[in-house]
Image (cartoon, rainbow, N blue to C red):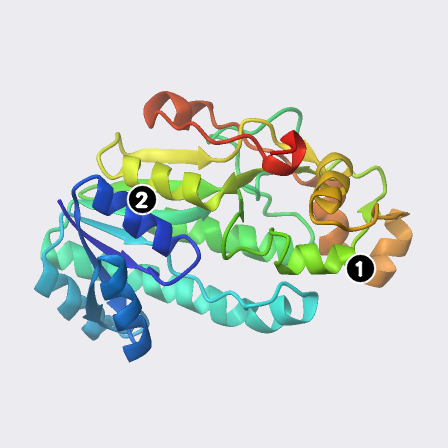
Amino acid sequence: MKILIAGATGAIGWPLINCLKRSGHTVFALVRSQHSRRALEKAGAEPISADALDGASVEAAVARVRPQAVINELTSLPKHYTPVEMRAAAERDRTVRIEGNINLLAAIRRAGVRRYLLQSSGFWYAPGAGLADESVPFALDASPGVAASARTYAELEARALGDGDIECVLLRYGFFYGPSTWYTKEGDLGEQLRARQLAVIGNGQGVYSFVHIEDAAAATAASVEAVPGIYNIVDDNPSPQRVWLPAFARAVGAPEPPYVTEQDALAAAGADAVYYATRLRGASNEKAKRELHFGPRPLEWLTGS
C-alpha cells in the first residue's frame, strides 16, 4: 500500500516509517527542508515537497503520490518541555494541527483517497470514575490550557469525521515516552526532576496514560488496515502522579520529588499543572487490544526494566 505521512519528522515519525516499511508498505513523507529530505530518504521514505499550511502544495503532493492512505502526525511542539516554551508554541501548534488537517482532508477528498489516520489525544478525557473508553467526551470545561487543547482535538476529530466518504481512524495517544521524547533520562522531564523542579501536587491522584513511542508507531501501522474508528493507544496500567513521578525520578537518578499543596502549586505553576496532577483521567486500551492486537510494553520505570 502507498502511504503518505504528514509530520514524519516528529517523534513518532521515524519509528512509524520503520513499522510501515517492515509491513511492506511504500512510504512517502511531506517535507519542507533539504536537511529533512536526506534524513527521510535514509529512513526509507520518499520525500514529497509540500507545506502543510499551503493548501495548494498539499493538494499537489497528494495528487502526485495518489496514496491509499494518509497519516496526519502534524505538530509544532517546542524542543524543550517548559511552561514558557509550551505557552509560546501553543498558538503555532494549534495552527499547524487545525490548518494542516483542513488542507489534508481537502486534498484527499479531491484525490479520492479512502483512508485517513489522525493523531489525537488519550489524556484529555473529562474527569470521572475509572478509565475512560473512546465514548467519553473531552474535558472541555477543564483548566484554561487543558480546555483549549481539548477543544482543539475535538475540532480536529469532528472535521475528520464529517465526511462519510473517508474512512477515518482517530488515534488517541497517551503521553509519549522513549527515544526522542521528553520522558527519558536525558529528556527534559529527567533533567527537571534532577533539578528538583517537579513535585507531586496535592494527593497526586491525576491518572496519566503513557505509551512508548515505538508501541504507538506499531499501533498506527496496524490501524492502516483496521476497522475505522477511534482507538486509545495507551499503556495497560495508567497510574496516578503520586505513583509514576517518584518511580520515574528513581529511574533517571533524581531525588524523590517533594509534595506541595494544591494552593502552593496553583500560585507557583498555575491551574493547568494542578489539573494534570489532580484531575487527569486515564484511558482504557481494551478496544485497541481487541481490534488492533495492540500489546504495549509495561511502563519501564514502574517495572524496573
Q: Which residue is found at the position 25% from the left and 47% from the top?
A: 116
| Outermost residue, bottom side | 34
Instruction: Point out which mark residue 22 bears.
Output: none
The mark closer to the camera, 1 or 2, is 1
Which residue carries the number 1 mark? 197
The relative height of residue 111 versus residue 37 in the rendered view (above or below) is above
Contact flag, marks 1 and 2 (Cβ < 8 Å): no
Residue 126 coordinates in the image, percent (x, y): 61, 38
Residue underneath mark 2: 161
User: Callout 1: 10 Å neighbours few (<14), some, many (20+)?
Assistant: few
Q: Is residue 265 above or below residue 167?
A: below
Quadrant (top left, top right, bottom left, bottom right) of the N terminus: top left
Q: Position of residue 108 (x, y in %)?
A: 18, 56
Question: In the rendered structure, which amino acid carries the disc numbered 1?
Answer: Gln
Q: Mark 1: which secondary structure? A: loop
Location of residue 251 by image quarter = top right
Q: Residue at x 54, y 27 (%)?
A: 236
Give the image quarter of residue 233.
Answer: top left
The residue at the point 25 percent across, 45 percent down is: 20
Image coordinates of residue 188 in percent, x first then y, are 64, 60
Describe residue 295's horizontal placement relative to residue 281 as left or right: left
Mark 1–mark 2 Cα distance, whole angstroms, equals: 41 Å
Is 82 on the left or on the right of 298, as rendered?
right
Q: Specify which label sits upstream in the sequence, 1 or 2.
A: 2
Mark 2: secondary structure: helix
- Asked whether the viewer can see residue 62, the reply is yes
Q: Nearer the viewer, residue 73 or 180?
A: 180
Give, as a three-letter code, the residue at label 2: Leu
